[in-house]
Amino acid sequence: MTETHDIDKVSGRSTTGHEWDGIKELNTPLPRWWIITFYLTIVWAIGYWVFYPAWPLLWSHTSGILNYSSRADVAVELANLEKIRGDKMVALGAAPLAEIEKDPALLALARARGKAAFGDNCAPCHGSGGAGARGFPNLNDDDWLWGGKLDQIEQTIQYGARSGHSKTREGAMLAFGKEGVLKPAEIATVANYVRSLSGLSTGPGFNAVAGSKIFADNCASCHGDAGKGNQELGAPNLTDKIWLYGSDEAAIVETVTNGRGGVMPAWVGRLDAPTIKALAVYVHSLGGGQ
């Protein structure tokens, strides 16, 4: 590479003195407007750092001279929205659940509010459409552990299941194998018996009489003699072919061996009373409400 400063014959501009393989670099400065804009952005950035939150600190961040907060803006907007909804939400909170479904205006409000609250709080477990998943109940069918009437749904939303709240829904599937109540062979037998209650196939050598006795001695107190369940205890119906944790033999053996005890959080105190009512109405309207 050679460095020879001269004037380019074509453009009339001086060169920088850099040349590669016979190609010379022109000394073409940036446009003045571009340079001015560049320096203005630097000034703008410095000003932003001073006036607005910008720099992260160990536990917080710089607040800036203006002490601006986008979260505060959102809080104000939400408060304004609540003012707009105020009278309607008061009416929703005051109306009995049964009356809400009879009033078209209140029902429309409850469904809209309930759908939004469901998406924000319930969908991560039950799915955006309430179809549930393994271990999370489907809210679209007619199978309910604790009851599918409006007031029952509202109570479940308020206090949850095994949530630790003093009014929570209690009840859990016992660990018959882990606690040594049943032996592995007995668990396999009763698992096949439970499958037979839903008309599912059973394993080779299955003894229905033995399975019936094991079920009567250990399971009927919660699930009923015929396996129809008990909503007061949260014991599922074992005959309706709807399974929360799976219907294959291995899944049922796991349930009988180690028990089950899913947790639903209590929403009272997290959500206001009108929103919980709206959620109850929305869930009830998904198709499975009793």
Image (cartoon, rainbow, N blue to C red):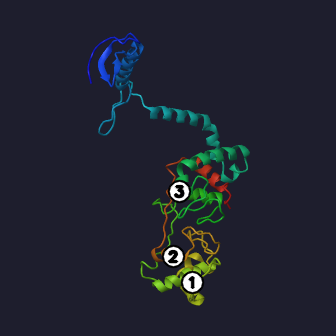
* Amino acid type assigned to the residue bearing label 3 in the image: Cys
Which secondary structure lies at badge 2? helix
Q: Please, what secondary structure does the residue beneath circle 1 have? A: loop
Q: Residue at x 69, y 47 (%)?
A: 107
Residue tagged 2: 250
Binning the other alpha carbons within 10 Å of mark 1 as few (below 14), some (14 to 19) or many (20 upward) gives few
Disc number for residue 203? 1
Residue labelled with disc 3: 125
- Picture coordinates of residue 198, whole percent (x, y): 64, 76
Q: Residue 50: x, y in percent?
A: 34, 24
Please report contact status of discs 2 and 1: CB closer than 8 Å, yes or no: no
Residue type, label 2: Ala
Q: Is residue 44 visible?
A: yes
Q: Which residue occupies 42% across, 31% down? A: 69
SS for dot 3: helix
What distance separates the C-alpha of mark 2 from that of mark 3?
24 Å
Mark 2 neighbour density, 10 Å: few (under 14) some (14–19) many (20 or more): few
